[in-house]
Image (cartoon, rainbow, N blue to C red):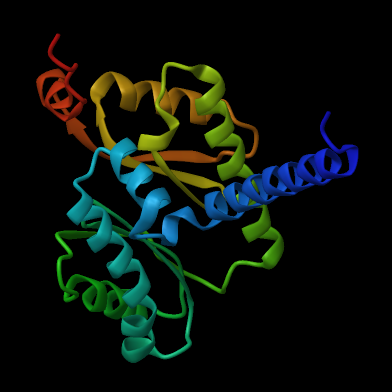
Amino acid sequence: MKDPQIQSRRWARAARLALVAVAAGTLLGACAPLMVGGFVGGALMVADRRTSGAQVEDQAIELKAGTRLREAIGERGHFNVTSYNRAVLLTGEAATDDDRKAAEQAIAKMENVRSVLNELEVMGNSSLTSRSSDSFISGRVKAAFVDAKDVHANVVKVVTERGVVYLMGRVTEREAARAAEITRGIPGVLKVVRVFEILTDAELADLLPKPAPK
């Protein structure tokens, strides 16, 4: 007969391990966009329609952009840089039109950047309340994609700035139209801007995992 104390300790240890695993999964999920290597990064790369090299380059562009912008225009303005397949979306606020142009030029000169969509507005910095509202809208859009089931939420990047939602990703025309339709139905969305790279059905089929031969 098994010792009850030993069995109790084993159950307690198993429970602790389970809690640690859940906590680790939660933390890693929150940090996933910053992870390049390891299991979580690899899992994201498999689900993404960019090549692994493009994903790494996009992360590098976003990480280095802040330094480049500070070198170009100091601390004037509020900037968000989002890179997808080396196409960069620049959103936020610039103090002057010269600063707006300088920000775009600084990003365009960065290594591996293919193109820049400059959506900066010449105006005062957005408030913390506005930014919190934007984050909430982005979360609702992503949740709506999951609920819809006919849009792959993990292949569409959502960026919201002052109520304007930008959608990025490598998608088919049908997927692009459906994602935009869903986004327009979210309360608080003032405008939807499609920044997609459109794929044909044949191009998408080439990206999908091939079934294992029988």
Residue 111 falls in image quadrant: bottom left
Q: Identify which residue, 110 or 96, lies in the foreground.
A: 110
Q: Nearer the viewer, residue 209 or 145?
A: 209
Is residue 23 among the parts visible in the rendering?
Answer: yes
Q: Is residue 124 above or below residue 13?
A: below
Q: Residue furthest top?
A: 214
* Most foreground residue, 83 or 118: 83
Is residue 25 rendered to the left or right of residue 152? right
Residue 185 location, quadrant? top right
| Residue occupying the point 36% across, 72% down | 63
* Number of numbered callouts drawn: 0
* Residue at the spot 83% in from the left edge and 28% down from the top edge: 1
**In the image: residue 208, left or right of residue 146:** left
Query: Residue 110 location in percent, x, y?
Result: 19, 75
Q: Is residue 195 visible?
A: no
Identify which residue is drawn at 35% across, 67% down: 62
| Left or right, 111 with reference to 180 | left
Most extreme residue toward the front, as rendered? Answer: 1
| Residue 155, quarter of picture | top left
Residue placed at 41% from the left, 27% from the top?
179
| Residue nearer the viewer, 4 or 21 | 4
- In this rendering, the answer to whether 123 lies above or below 35 is below
Q: Position of residue 133 (x, y in %)?
A: 67, 51
Using the image, determine if residue 111 lies above or below residue 169: below
Q: Which x, y percent locates residue 25?
A: 58, 47
Quadrant showing the C terminus: top left
